Amino acid sequence: MKKILITDALAPSGKAVLVNAGLEVIEILGSDSEKISAVLPEIDAWIIRSGTTIGAHEIQQASRLKAIGRAGVGVDNIDIDAATSHGVVVMNTPGGNTISAAEHTIALMMSLARNIPAGDTTMKAGTWDRKSLVGTELNGKTLGVLGLGRIGQEVARRALGLQMKVIGYDPYVAQDQLIVNDITVQDLEKVIEEADVLSLHLPRNKDTLDLISTPELKKMKSSAMLINCARGGLVNESDLAAALNEGIIAGAAIDVYSAEPPVDNPLINARHIVLTPHLGASTREASENVAVQVATQIKDYLVHDRLNNTLNLPIKDMSILKSMGDLLGLALEIGRLQHPLHTAAVKSFRLSYNGDPNQIQPLLYSAFEGIMRDRYDGVINLINAQTVAQSKGISLSTLHDPALSHVQNVVAVTVESAAGVVWELLGYTDVQGGQRLTKVNNYHVDVLLDGPLILVLNSDVPGVVGEVGTLLGNFGINIAEYSLSRQEGDIALSLIKCDSAPEAALLEKLKSISSIRECYFLG
Ligand code: NAD
Ligand code: MLT
């Protein structure tokens, strides 16, 4: 039974998806690292939210791990590079908490503009203080949005409804790609300078760390308010505390912190600040959405081999994978057949294809997985094929070649080893779904790949087929198919499909037949 570890609170509906699919759920909440370490070697998938950090060490320990599912958006708590090099898929659940995060941002903006938390606190302390809590109207004011992705645009949509003007900055989104109209895309500096409310909606990474520090805070209007409902670390917390205490900006509302829960954080006692404990996605709806979404994605991968919302798959459009049907299996099989043909290390690996060019990259990785399965000490799959090739100095390439064959969707795999040996195998999937090998180097063959195969290169002289047949018979091997091919020259190639796998001694005997030049068991 496949095991799923859950280390952050997940809605019961998510767990139900896993259990109903026959997966075992191990729930360890409360950061008990000893308990977590003990189960890591057994787990097939790991589901987290923002409370768990998964580093290279944990990924190394989890030797069976196939997938990490993040119930939410931010993946800055996962070492994605380490996951990739171990062939572990990292998935998140974009969209599941977008509306909740956008609404929380608006709630923070309103709270700040109208001093609602302060009003609440003073009232509960028995004070009737209206004078010091005079607020600001948002109508007609400018909202600056940094990061025009899902949440940024949903915040903009709501702010437009409040009659605000919205400007935004996102180096990866062009004006005509925006779903929400009426956002004006500008450069970073202009957005910072012009915003009455500046709201951050971008990921934390090396480019965005400390994006808002003292120089940026000084460029903001002194009446401006800053909102961070995205990630801690985007705003330098000491600089912001100083800017608030010195009146450089008017106020801030913060939901996320560089360390959570915050420890000695200068923002806690800063002036004119509204703080919430990472509540952006904390609604019943979002918790439900991300739990069901992440659990479904993990189940789909572990049970049906289907991928969704993968962050480290080196293939741009995941819908391509869905359209490929049996093709990935064909490429895998042709790659696998190459393995016994090369005793030396693989030097270069090329996949040629005459079908849809968009399918060529996944085919390459799948075929490479095929040859490396028995050569690589670790998991190899579509996720880490490129990384493994790089680490082993193997050059991977593709060739889209419409002239490869008159048959549709033909896959050819050409491998050169460090010993200078080159083999090219070519095949396709027939209408019944059978995988057929139709060419080996320049030899035309036609063999259905549904049984153990022996490949023989022999001098084209009379009597070889008889000798081979007799020897196989002596070893009790029944021949299912004998495909003989020759080209100009004196070497013939045979593919012999057997009813059972030959033992090593039989192959040695075959090699000792004087007319046989080379002989391989392709499996
Ligand atoms: P998204 O991927 O849809 O949008 C992020 C946008 O940021 C993208 O459009 C991207 O192009 C842009 N971006 C990346 N680097 C940038 C840069 N250097 N400058 C400007 N823009 C840049 O993600 P989303 O779902 O909108 O989430 C946005 C952020 O909100 C994430 O950090 C996510 O983790 C966080 N989040 C927080 C909560 C919460 O509870 N507070 C809830 C959900 C999401
Ligand atoms: C996210 O990135 O999805 C949010 O921060 C919410 C969460 O951490 O659960």
Image: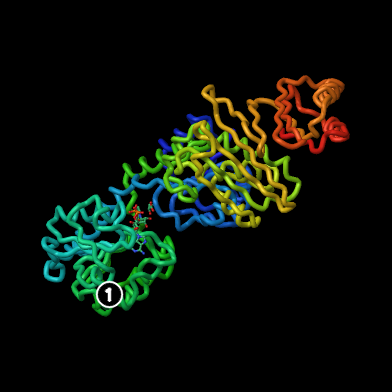
Using residue 356 as the reference point, say whether residue 385 is left or right of it.
right
Residue 405, x across and y down, in percent: 54, 35
Using residue 36 as the reference point, say whether residue 174 is left or right of it.
left
Q: Which colour scheme is used?
A: rainbow
Q: Residue furthest bottom?
A: 246
Q: SS class of the residue under badge 1?
A: helix
Q: Residues within 10 Å of mark 1 (few under 14, many from 20)?
A: many
Residue 362, x across and y down, in percent: 51, 43
The foreground one among 390 and 230 is 390
The foreground one among 432 and 187 is 432
Q: Quadrant of ligand 1?
A: bottom left
Which quadrant would the C terminus be assigned to in this image? Answer: top right
Give the residue drawn at x 30%, y 75%.
Answer: 216
The foreground one among 101 and 331 is 331
Tell me the quarter of the picture where residue 1 sits.
Answer: top right
Q: Is residue 119 above or below residue 329?
A: below
Tell me the quarter of the picture where residue 429 sits.
Answer: top right
Q: Residue furthest front?
A: 488
Decide if residue 58 is in sight here.
yes
The amino acid at mark 1 is Leu
Q: Mark 1 points at which residue?
A: 244
Counting labels gives 1
Residue 344, x across and y down, in percent: 74, 49
